[in-house]
Amino acid sequence: MEWEFTPEEVVKGEVEYGLEDFRKDLMQEVRHNMSGMESVMPERVFEVIYDLCYWVATGNEYEDFLDSVDDESFFPQFLRSIREHLETNIEMLGAILQRLIMDRVDDQSMPLELALKEVDALQREIAARPPMLS
């Protein structure tokens, strides 16, 4: 995806761009890129791509995620083929998460450990909802 702002601007709080915005934009990108592929469910592809982005944005390794994906599906090869294209998405998602954590630590004087748990819980709650498309 491309934005008119940088991850650094998100981290600094100069731009309001949150998890729901990111998920909506990512879903639109997946739907656009998957058009014409009726045999593939864009919602499932979106879920896997989002999970991968979150996995890597939180400090885990890309290859470890691929190792956890069913080898019988098309996902491992597909995710390998789009790795380079996901780098900016992963960076932006990491910036969003960092901003959410900083908001809790700086503005609410929350201990870092608690802020990490709270942001993870928030992310899980948002990820459990279908992404908005408009």
Image (cartoon, rainbow, N blue to C red):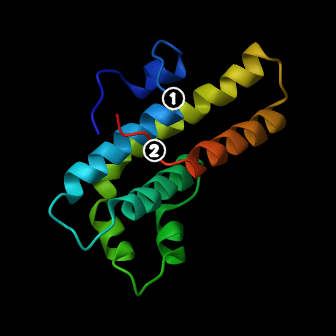
Horizontally, residue 97 falls left or right of residue 32, namely right
Q: Pinpoint residue 108: horizontal percent, then vertical percent.
A: 79, 17
| Residue denoted by label 1 | 18
**Tag in front: 1 or 2:** 2
The relative height of residue 117 versus residue 52 in the rendered view (above or below) is above
Which quarter of the picture shows residue 98?
top right
Q: In the picture, which quadrant includes the C terminus?
A: top left
Name the mark on residue 37.
none
At x 39%, y 43%, the residue is 89
- State the residue in front, 134 or 104: 134
At x 33%, y 78%, the residue is 74
| Residue denoted by label 2 | 131
Which quarter of the picture shows residue 80?
bottom left
Secondary structure at badge 1 equals loop
Q: Pinpoint residue 96: horizontal percent, then vertical percent.
A: 53, 31
At x 27%, y 52%, the residue is 31
Q: In the picture, which quadrant includes the N terminus?
A: top left
The relative height of residue 112 versus residue 74 in the rendered view (above or below) is above
Horizontally, residue 94 falls left or right of residue 43, namely right
Secondary structure at badge 2 equals loop
Q: Pinpoint residue 43: horizontal percent, then vertical percent.
A: 39, 59
The relative height of residue 18 versus residue 123 in the rendered view (above or below) is above
- State the residue in front, 82 or 128: 128
- Closer to the chain start, of discs 1 and 2, is 1
Q: Amino acid at mark 1?
A: Gly
